[in-house]
Amino acid sequence: MNVEEMELKLKQIDAHLAAREEALEIKQHQMEEQTTAIQQANNQHSELIEAMNGMRLEIQNVVAELETIRKKNKTLVQEKRTLEKELESVNSQNILASGSLEIEQKKILVMNELMEKQNEFINSSTTNRTFNSSRTGKEIPLPQFEGNPLEFQRWISNVDDYFQK
């Protein structure tokens, strides 16, 4: 082998090495681009994970709020039922009170009618009364009923006493 052939061979090897170096540089550049793309994708993935975690927290907060609202609604429904029962009870009491009032008014009317009839009887008996000469003692006047329901029993017993004498 002579020097020229060796130089030629050396040039070929240099050219081949240069081509290989150039190919390696291209491959290295491609790998750097791919690494950058992977890092960008990784960053996007991290951002998405952060966004998802943020959304999870928001969802948990919303669920907690909904749970609180549901409990409040349940409490409000119970309060509403209690108030409805209370209102129903008050209405029943009002109905009973109005019925009692009507009964008391009817009692007063009956008592007034009774008093009028008794007054008529008393007036008619005093005008039609003939005095018995054989009766001794002082004449006791018949007590008058004044219309007070609390004094009615006393009035009745006084009238009974009058007729017993």
Image: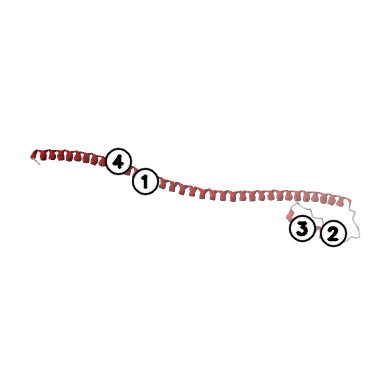
Select label 3 or label 1 by which is in front.
1
Residue at point 78% right, 50% down?
110
Q: Which residue in the protein does label 1 denote? A: 49
Select label 2 or label 4 by which is in front.
4
Question: Mark 4 or mark 3, which has the lower sequence index?
Answer: 4
Q: Secondary structure at mark 1?
A: helix
Residue 60 position, x and y percent, is 43, 48
Select label 2 or label 1 by which is in front.
1
Q: Which residue in the protein does label 3 denote? A: 153
Select label 4 or label 1 by which is in front.
4
Which is more toward the observer, 94 or 143?
Answer: 94
Q: Please determine whether, in this image, residue 9 is positioned above or below residue 111.
A: above
Relative placement, left or right, of 29 versus 143 is: left
> Could you tell me if the residues under marks 4 and 3 are in contact, i.e. CB atoms within 8 Å?
no
Question: Mark 3 or mark 1, which has the lower sequence index?
Answer: 1
Disc number at residue 37? 4
Label 2 amino acid?
Phe
Residue at point 79% right, 57% down?
156
Q: Secondary structure at mark 3?
A: helix
